[in-house]
Image: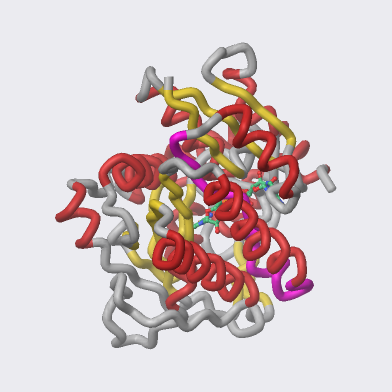
Amino acid sequence: MNNVIVTGGCGFIGSNFIRYLLKNYDDIRVINLDLLTYAGNQTNLSAYQFDARYIFTRTDICDKNHLNQIFNNHKPTAVIQFAAESHVDRSIEDSMPFVTTNVNGTVNLLEAVKKQNYPIRFLHVSTDEVYGSLDEYGAPFTEKTPYDPRSPYSASKAASDHFVQAYHETFGLDTVITNCSNNYGPYQHPEKFIPTIINRALNYMKVPVYGNGMNIRDWLYVEDHCAALCAVLFKGKSGQKYNIGGDDPQPNLEIVKTILNKMNLNVFENFEFVEDRKGHDFRYDINSIKIQEELGWKPKVSFEEGIEKTIEWYTANQNWVRNTLGKK
Ligand SMILES: NC(=O)c1ccc[n+]([C@@H]2O[C@H](COP(=O)([O-])OP(=O)(O)OC[C@H]3O[C@@H](n4cnc5c(N)ncnc54)[C@H](O)[C@@H]3O)[C@@H](O)[C@H]2O)c1
């Protein structure tokens, strides 16, 4: 049995990833380290609470001693680093928690790996937002696009990516980095864009749209992201970066229209434009040819199919939404 440490496994992508791993790989035991901030919810994985292949430990990745104890006890073969402060709007309110967890926390984990003196694969889960913002004509981001982060969130993720790469170059750690576009799907915190649209629509409240709704994002169904992460974890080349995307960039307003239409609501009566986010990046678009050609991954779930599943999930899980929003 291979012990694998997953950090931030009670959040949106982390919990989907643990479910994906335990369903698809029999020889893996997951040790989930999560601080359970407002964004972490242990019940996301309650189906596995009595499964011998799943261990949860409430841990702050900023607590070096606790990390060393866990590494000594479990001797992991891999670490998948999801733990982060992840909401851009919160980073605009207060950057410090982003520096603390996203930068210091990642460096602590790298140090814990380095102390073990045996090879441990370190998969760092990052974002396409580190590449900055494209104008209308800019070519999609490749792995060689220079970093140009423009929000405190993306700046903290960019810094963490640089530390991961530096630990590969300087200390020879076996690292891989992924930069993924916007995810959507079950268990995403209701403060994020797609859950906000669905939940407000379900409760007959107007959906807020930043600016003129023309900002463009690429969307990937979370299960496709999990499959991509497994491809990189098991087959990715050490020291490499891999972009992951859904090949489906759309303006925010289009997303709102699609969801309201699918929920049988009149589009123009059910959304309103609100003041734009400060420094709102105009366009992200990601080229994921490298992972497709080198590792044979490609997205399987169309936006049409993924959004229907997501609307269905939020409709059936309104209690989860209320409990999550009630958490401080
Ligand atoms: N959501 C996206 O669209 C997206 C896209 C690309 C990359 N990412 C990256 O994927 C990762 C996960 O994103 P998400 O949307 O699932 O985030 P999330 O906010 O839903 O989950 C973050 C998790 O990290 C935990 N956490 C926070 N601080 C911690 C600490 N100090 N120690 C231990 N655990 C801590 C939280 O409790 C929570 O469970 C992040 O690193 C994010 O940058 C997200």
Q: Identify the residue at horizontal 84%, vertical 48% (top origin).
A: 328
Over which residues does the magenta segment extend?
A: 77-95
In this view, the residue in front, 252 or 191, is: 191
Farthest residue toward the left? Answer: 293
In this view, the residue in front, 125 or 69, is: 69
Q: Is residue 198 visible?
A: no
Q: Is residue 250 above or below residue 118?
A: below
* Residue 159: x %, y % from top left: 56, 72
Q: Identify the residue at horizontal 64%, vertical 22% (top origin).
A: 46
Left or right, 238 with respect to 157, comes to left
Q: Identify the residue at horizontal 74%, vertical 35% (top origin).
A: 58
Please check the rendered image and state whether residue 280 is part of the magenta-colored stretch, yes or no.
Answer: no
Dividing the image into 4 quarters, which one contains the N terminus?
A: top left
Left or right, 248 with respect to 1, comes to left
**Image quarter for residue 97?**
bottom right
**Image quarter for residue 40?**
top right
